[in-house]
Structure formats: C-alpha cells, structure tokens
Amino acid sequence: NAGVMQNPRHLVRRRGQEARLRCSPMKGHSHVYWYRQLPEEGLKFMVYLQKENIIDESGMPKERFSAEFPKEGPSILRIQQVVRGDSAAYFCASSPYPTGESSGELFFGEGSRLTVL
Amino acid sequence: AQTVTQSQPEMSVQEAETVTLSCTYDTSESDYYLFWYKQPPSRQMILVIRQEAYKQQNATENRFSVNFQKAAKSFSLKISDSQLGDAAMYFCAHTPGSSNTGKLIFGQGTTLQVKP
C-alpha cells in the first residue's frame, strides 16, 4: 500500500509565478490535510478537504492560496503570484476517517519544498 | 488558544544513553490526543508515539515512552538506548479528540543529536 505521494518534491518559481503542489492520499483515505512548514518552525495547519469539499480552511491565507480535492485525481494546493515569503515545505497528510472518529493519526507525505526566487 | 511548547531547541545524547524531550500544551478540551512525530533529514514526518488523554497509562512503543501529566499539561518523550538513527527533529503535537478537522497543533520542535 503506497503511502501519501506528493509531487513535485522540489519546485522553484520566480516571484509572480504560480505554484501547484499535488497530493495523492493513501489508498482508501478520503480525508486530506495540507500543512506548511517554514524554516526552523513546526508545521502549521492550512486546510482540510474531503472529496469535492473544503471542510476547514481556517489556516489558509486569505489571498492567492486555494486548495481542491476533486472526485477524481489528486488534491492540489495552488499558490498564485508567489512571493519570497511563500518559500516553505508544504506537507500533505491523509486519514481514512475524520480525526474525531479515529485515533487522530495522520499519515504524512514527504513534502514539497517550494523555493521562490 | 491552543498551543504546544517545546522549550528545548536542541538536545544531545550519547549513543545507548537515555534522553527526555519536554513538551507542554494548553487546551480547554477534556478529550484530546497527543503525538510525538520524528522528522529525519529526509523531512518525512513519522509518527513515534500517540497518547489518548482519557488514558492514564503512559504510552510505550519499544524504546520510546511518554510521561503524560494531564493536570500539568505535560507530555515528555523518553528515548531509551539511543541509536544513531534517532537523530532527527522531534515535534510534539496535539489535536482535540472532539474535533474532526485534523487540525494538529505542532510545537516548534527539538533537534536531537546522537553522539557515537
């Protein structure tokens, strides 16, 4: 059973470009979470999605950031008009249940490192 | 606000010795989960150990154990017989058990160095 797959592992963008990060959850998992890790910091929650629904986006910046998890295909975190402050590692995690109905464990991918020049 | 604090930015331990990493948290919830995650240089987050707040017994996973003090809101990780492969950044995390949003709250992390 493959783990959570994220791609690309590394992405370099110039200021003003768009960044798209993809996440395929573990097989059988329908709950996806995105976290951001700035250098030397812990992970910060961004958004929680189920298939075709955004459940909680309280950690998402109000502008330029969006996320989706379509019925078919991976979840995508999209950052428009990137700025240097967007440089970070973006982690995707998945679970088979809402965490309130399970042990709370999330299964993380290896992250996508975005560098904005 | 819910917070997680790791007061030790860096720790070091001699191979085969024991080390304890500290974590305190703040929550108004009565039911919640606590976790320790390990982040090696590969950067993947690996679950080390999990504790349910309603369980009084401290969780144990092989060489890893926790000291969970609910009243003090303390959740320390003890690594026994430290190995070189234990070198990594360790994050303490917390999530409300009554919540279904998967909103883990992480501490700032502790970098553990294991000396041969």
Image (spheres, coloured by chain):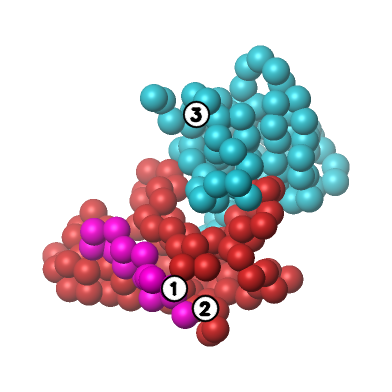
Quarter of the image for residue B86 reads bottom left
Q: Is residue B76 above or below residue A31?
A: below
**Alpha carbons under labels 2 and 1: distance apart:** 8 Å
Q: Residue at x 36, y 51 (%)?
A: B40
Q: Residues within 10 Å of mark 3 (few under 14, many from 20)?
A: many
Q: Residue at x 75, y 25 (%)?
A: A52
Q: Which residues are magenta?
A: B56-69
Which tag is nearer the camera, tag 2 or tag 3?
A: 2
Above or below — where is B88 with respect to A4? below
Spot occupied by residue A47 in the image (x, y as percentages of width and height): 71, 43
The residue to which callout 3 is attached is: A26
Label 2, on which residue?
Answer: B70
Give the chain letter at badge 2: B
Q: Residue furthest bottom?
A: B72
Q: Are marks 2 and 1 in contact (CB under 8 Å)?
A: yes
Quarter that holds the C terminus of chain A = top right
Dot 3 falls on which chain? A
Q: CA distance from mark 3 to mark 1?
A: 32 Å
Q: Secondary structure at mark 1?
A: loop
- The subunit letter for the residue under badge 1 reads B
Q: Which chain is cyan?
A: A
Instruction: Check disc 3 and give the amino acid type.
Output: Met
Q: Is residue B10 left or right of residue A54?
A: left
Whether labels 2 and 1 belong to a single chain: the reply is: yes
Instruction: For the N terminus of chain A, give its image quadrant.
Output: top left
The magenta stretch spans residue B58: yes
Q: Tell me the tag on residue B56.
A: 1
Q: CA distance from mark 2 to mark 3?
A: 33 Å
